[in-house]
Image (cartoon, grey):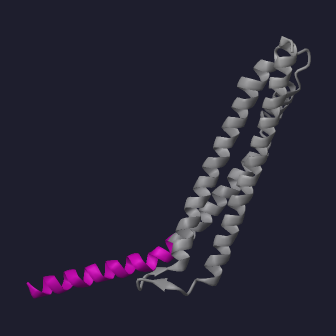
Amino acid sequence: MDRDELIFNEYKLYSEQKENFIDRNFKTNRFYMIAIFVLVVSMLYTGNIVFLNTISATLVFAALGVSISALWWMNVDTYNTLIKIKYANVIEKIEQKFPVKPFTDEYQGINEYRNNKVFMFSDIQKLIASISALFFFAVCVSELSPIVMNIFNKVLTTALKIKSGI
């Protein structure tokens, strides 16, 4: 096998691995979307369940939802960074040895399109993750407010009892 054929085989293998990586990214996003959906449905069906006389199942699922949404956002960001590295630092360098550079041209086209401030798929994923995090955070706040007020009232009542006893 000559040098050019070896480079081409490495290029082909790396391109296939990059495509597999992108497929794994889509599967990961599907997992997060299903997890968010399951949490919302769980919150709807377990809203009346209360643990330890104060903590509701809704609060637990909402806190879990905030965490999962944050992880999803970070995951999207990480996959985007790694995909860019695979394009810019690896595939483009291999393509410098070829007369035709399809991935380099594609990446330049994406960058030109991106510079026009158009939403990309990853931006939409991050937006959905952010909206779900805000939703779950709002549910957490609404569930925590009565608990915090109850604790505040108990502290205030205890302080007043202590003050009147002195």
Q: Is residue 65 left or right of residue 157?
A: right
Instruction: Please state which of residues 148 and 23 is positioned toward the viewer in this rendering.
Output: 23
Query: Eyeballing the image, is 138 above or below 72?
Result: below
Residue placed at 50% from the left, 70% from the top? Answer: 141
Quarter where residue 22 is shown: top right
Q: Position of residue 39 (x, y in %)?
A: 64, 71
Count of marks placed on residues: 0
Residue 162 visible in image: yes
Residue placed at 58% from the left, 55% from the top? Answer: 70
Which quadrant does the C terminus fall into?
Answer: bottom left
Query: Eyeballing the image, is 90 above or below 136?
Result: above
Residue placed at 79% from the left, 47% from the top? Answer: 23
Q: Position of residue 28 (x, y in %)?
A: 71, 53
Which quadrant does the N terminus fall into?
Answer: top right
Magenta region includes residue 120: no
Q: Position of residue 73 (x, y in %)?
A: 63, 51
Query: Eyeballing the image, is 34 above or below 50?
Result: above
Q: Position of residue 65 (x, y in %)?
A: 59, 65
Range of magenta residues? 141-166
Q: Is residue 82 left or right of residue 121?
A: left
Residue 137 visible in image: no
Looking at the image, the residue that sits furthest to the right is 100
Q: Is residue 48 left or right of residue 157?
A: right
The main secondary structure of the magenta stretch is helix
Magenta region includes residue 157: yes
Instruction: Please state which of residues 1 and 51 is positioned toward the viewer in this rendering.
Output: 1
